[in-house]
Image (cartoon, coloured by chain):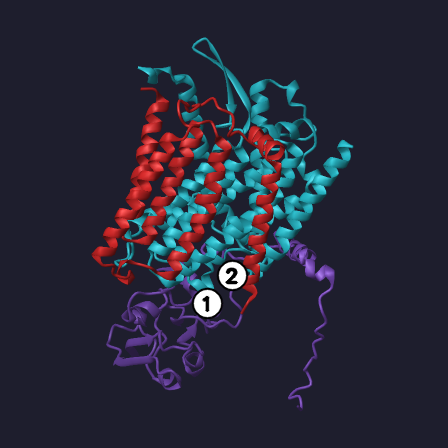
Chain colours: A red, B cyan, C purple
Amino acid sequence: MSTTAILFWFLSALALLSATMVLISKNPVHSILWLIIVFFAISGHYILLNAQFIAIVNLIVYAGAIMVLFLFVVMLMNLNSDSEPQKNNRLRLAGTIAGGCLMLIMIDVVRSASEVQNATAMVREGNIGLIKTLGKVLFVDYVVPFEITSVLFLSAMIGAVVIGKKD
Amino acid sequence: MTLLAIDWTLLIEKLVLIAVIITASLVIAMYATYGERKVAAILQDRVGPNRAGPFGLLQPLADGMKLFFKEEIIPNTSNKLLFVLGPCLAMLTAMMTSAVIPWGNEIHFTLFGADRHIPLQIADINIGVLFIFGVVSTGVYGIMIGGWASNNKFSLMAAMRGASQVISYELAMGLSFIALLMLTGSLSMKTIVEQQVHGHWNIIYQPLGFLIFLICAFAECNRAPFDLPEAENELNFGYHQEYSSMKLGFYLFAEYINMFISSVIMATLYFGGYDVPFLNEANLPVNIAALIGVVALLVKAFIFIFIFMWVRWTLPRFRYDQLMNLGWKSLIPLALVNMFITGAVILWRQG
Amino acid sequence: MQPLTKKVKQLERKPMTLLERIYLPSIFKGMAITFSHIFKKVPTIRYPEEKRPFAKVFRGLQVLNRDEEGRERCTACGLCALACPAEAITMEAAERQRGEENLYREEKYAAKYEINMLRCIFCGLCEEACPKDAIYLSETFAPANYKRKGFIYGKEDLLIPDPLTQPEEYEKAKGERAPATH
């Protein structure tokens, strides 16, 4: 096994384990901390794909900002297993079935997607994730969708301000 | 074994470099505590620590010894694992930023008949500046986790303050960065320094950007006048209130390492890094030039550390709403204006 | 409302000018002030190595004096105890025996002489009350102690060394305020 393969399996195992722990942790603060580890593992995968820019932006935006806000809210609300509302078993069963079905569909969609078929990951040599290439793609090929997205964000921001202004 | 395909000499080289840099930043952080007390004393017409060793030079060692021998207290109602994890994270993120800083030009020596050119930088990644941002943005977890795990209202409040402060000031910091990056056109720290070695220092082009960056650096390091997370008189030392012994030491130490690293970053980005003004390094032997470069960078960093301390012992602490107003209503618009002006000037010069 | 004093000063609350609102000039002014303190003289006295000279009128620990022949001057008259506003002084008198003339100047002497330094207010009234110049206040002060007992100074603590047998110690303990011997 090459170093890359070892890293890949290690990061995958870490991501899956942490993702599971997010779900089964009793304490929501622990859940968030596990989620942060998931983000780190995914960033590791990005680095393996030579997408350093995406990796670090993933860390800055998700691990650095969004998860801090999550943690912020959860810590302030002081949620813990005692205050969790009790769910009955029938609801749990229904939830498991629904979630399981969704997972099956997702796996099937990913497996049968034509883009993914016969494609190999460009480990350590692809350059789509590098900042120069990504910038060119975003500001030349996809400039209209990119700008529309920014307008969307702007309107979301203004909306947040409007909501916040109301006493 | 494919593992052997790794360039072992490179690995050893890097490990030695990492060890040297970490040791150096620890020692500098240690003496920054001494410097802090001495600077405070001098600014207040006092003498400062002068008992341990000549001029009190052994004071940091004495402080460290004291912290090590203190009783380790973990509160009963705290979350044990996270309580220990907090200071570790604070220390880890403080140390990690030093990886992408170019400490000097490359040194050159011959070992076992093989010529080695060793760049004095652990990793010259092409997103160096963003890496620093990423690490800094995760640095807040040390405070948050520690504050929450202490299970104490003061600590929690301090953790919340710290988190919101760091997030708010990161934005303005990023925006002031973007203006700089538009000038340099590169995210790699090494390239940014090289450009300054050959051209002018970035402070000439970006005085306003530097000012914003400096203010944000104060806020990110939780230094006065932005030391709200540990405001003694309102929060009893804030997030590290429940900590004792070396865990407290880690928190205090991380603050000084952060201060040192952010001083180095400011020197690197705006003040030419290891560049010595009016000196042509190319005329000197490689190793001596590298050594002079390292010394120049450290001198710049020490000047910034002094400014950090000087500000701390001059300005009173901000109130919380003033802090948020300054961040969101003054610094971010100012940084945006700075960005627009920079962009306009760049476009105008391109014609 | 009628102002209580004439010192009332009406503050003008005008809106801040732009320069004041930028806040940077005042920051730099403050920084300059603190920076100028680097060059100021440090008034600290590094205590164990350097000692500040006491004022001429300083009143410190009491000393039980001897005369030039090394005899205790105290005659245990009790005037000092009477004069003491803090009631810090107690003593027991004894009669001088034959053969003790070189020890005690008068026929009566203080067998026990105690001053409670926790009570003493160092007013110096004992010194003024003493008709024999047997007690005076020196330039030292009572050092710290762990127990209250340590602050009750007996005769062995208060008595000045003998000028004949221990002239060096006597000179050291005498101090500036010793009454002129006569």
Q: Please indicate, yes or no, whether residue C12 appears anywhere in the rendered image.
A: yes
Pick the residue in front: A93 or A32: A93
As drawn, B162 above or below B116: below
Residue B305 disc label: none
Residue that label 2 marks: C52
Q: Position of residue A48 (x, y in %)?
A: 42, 27
For the image, the number of numbered tags is 2
Residue that label 1 marks: C139
Pick the residue in front: B93 or B50: B93
Residue drawn at 41 percent across, 17 percent down? B9
Amino acid type, mark 2:
Arg
Report, in whole angstroms, how far the alpha carbon at label 1 lies from the one at label 2.
11 Å
Residue extending farthest to the bottom is C2
Residue drawn at 38 percent across, 82 percent down? C86
Residue drawn at 64 percent across, 88 percent down? C4
Q: Label 1: state its secondary structure.
A: loop
Q: Position of residue A92 (x, y in %)?
A: 24, 53
Q: Is residue B279 left or right of residue B44?
A: right
Pick the residue in front: B121 or A163: A163
